[in-house]
Image: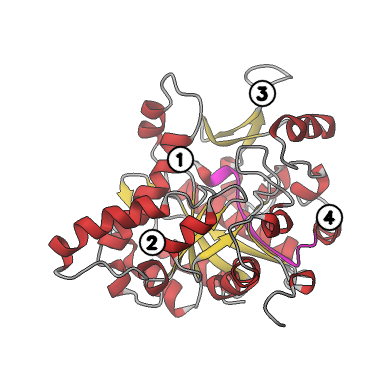
Amino acid sequence: MQDGDSSKMPLIDSDAHVVETDHTWAYLQGSDHRYRPQLVRPGGEDLAEYWLIDGKLRGLARQVVTAAGFDELSRRSGRNMSTPQEAREMEDVSARVAHMDELGVSLQVLYPTIFIQQVTDRAEVEVALCRSYNQWVASLCANYLDRLRWICVLPLLSMNDSLEQLEWSRQRGAVGVFMRPIEGARLLHDPYFYPLYDAVSRGNMAIGVHVGNANPQEIDLLAQRNNNGFWRFRLALIGACHSLLMSEVPTQFPSLRFHFAEAASQWIPYVVKDLERRWPGRKGSEFPRDALARFHMFVSCETDDDLAHVVEYSGEDTLVIGTDYGHNDQSTEIDALVKLRDNGGLTDRQYWRIVDQNPRALWAL
């Protein structure tokens, strides 16, 4: 394939979602059935559904939006957000793939929805729910691994169980491990995660750091008089990238790849400039301008990012893009991969890298 031949490029969506349903928990076995999440509507029929887990409302709420509602959201936002319910919930995998064909997308990497927030603070519950989720997604993708790959969810409250589920998932098409920027009381550069990072590196997988937060106390604090996820979710991700770069993780695990998803890419120049000031005092050398590429840090951009400016700081080898398929928030743009071509700040070569070459390197496709 020649640079600039964008009409024939394969387009890789690095951040699509699957929306969990009751079927997600059909793989719970034996006594684990007592942990089965239940959908409830505490605010009435017209409000969002929540998952009741272990006696508490947990995880990200399911969006109760009709097809007409998605069309109206698309009209108001100026972005295409519409997805068929059977496709976003994977009730009909062939419908999902057919919609990908309509969008010109050759492959989607599937992130979870409910796990963007903490679902439980008990290890035994987390082990059971993660196992059922992974088995559910693996079964959905099994016959479509040329079109659908997935991010496994691990019970990080129990590292031994996490490592076991990691290997099971890797053998069945998982290309990465889902993590939140804050994992309970731990940050991502905590040595507690080193056994996981070692296993992910050896398995040639990636760490998918998605906007989210698994610390309920912090979420409650940052949600006060502030009914959006910018501070508690997006800024947490930016801080996680900064802290990882300043930590020993990149040198301890030199082949480990990270993906920072759904916070756009406009923050990269700010983080790089800040690191340029801090790095010499901490590391005793100048901050390498190719640090993101050197340390395998990939970032999802969005179509309205000032990418000509961002690329000056990120380089050409680290940006990818996702559609946020299945959601209906400020990051969702179902035709983002095609629309990105119209961004005036990109050369044909840069566009090709973002939609194909960089995601292939990130996910080892």
Mark 1 and mark 4: span between their CA atoms? Answer: 29 Å
The answer to which of marks 1 and 4 sits earlier in the sequence is 4
As displayed, is residue 176 above or below residue 93? below
Q: Is residue 95 left or right of residue 144?
A: right
Identity, as a three-letter code, of the amino acid under mark 3? Arg
Dividing the picture into quarters, in which one does residue 75 lie? top right
Count the marks: how many?
A: 4
Identity, as a three-letter code, of the amino acid under mark 1? Phe
Could you tell me if the residues under marks 2 and 4 are in contact, i.e. CB atoms within 8 Å?
A: no
Part of the protein shown in magenta: 104-115
139 and 217: which one is in front? 217
Task: List the single residue furthest toward the bottom.
Answer: 1
Could you tell me if the residues under marks 1 and 4 are in contact, i.e. CB atoms within 8 Å?
A: no
Q: Which residue is mark 2?
A: 159
Residue depth check, mark 2 versus mark 4: number of the one nearer the observer: 4
Q: Which residue is mark 4?
A: 99
Identity, as a three-letter code, of the amino acid under mark 4? His
Image point (60%, 43%), residue name = 331
Q: Which residue is mark 3?
A: 41
Image point (52%, 58%), residue name = 308
Residue density around tag 1, few if under 14, some if 14–19, many if 20 or more, within 10 Å: many
Q: Which residue is mark 1?
A: 233
* Residue 55 position in % (x across, y down): 51, 30
Q: Which type of secondary structure does the marked residue at label 1 adopt?
A: helix
The answer to which of marks 1 and 3 sits earlier in the sequence is 3
The answer to which of marks 1 and 2 sits earlier in the sequence is 2
Mark 1 and mark 2: span between their CA atoms? Answer: 24 Å
Identity, as a three-letter code, of the amino acid under mark 2? Met
Residue depth check, mark 1 versus mark 3: number of the one nearer the observer: 1
The answer to which of marks 2 and 4 sits earlier in the sequence is 4
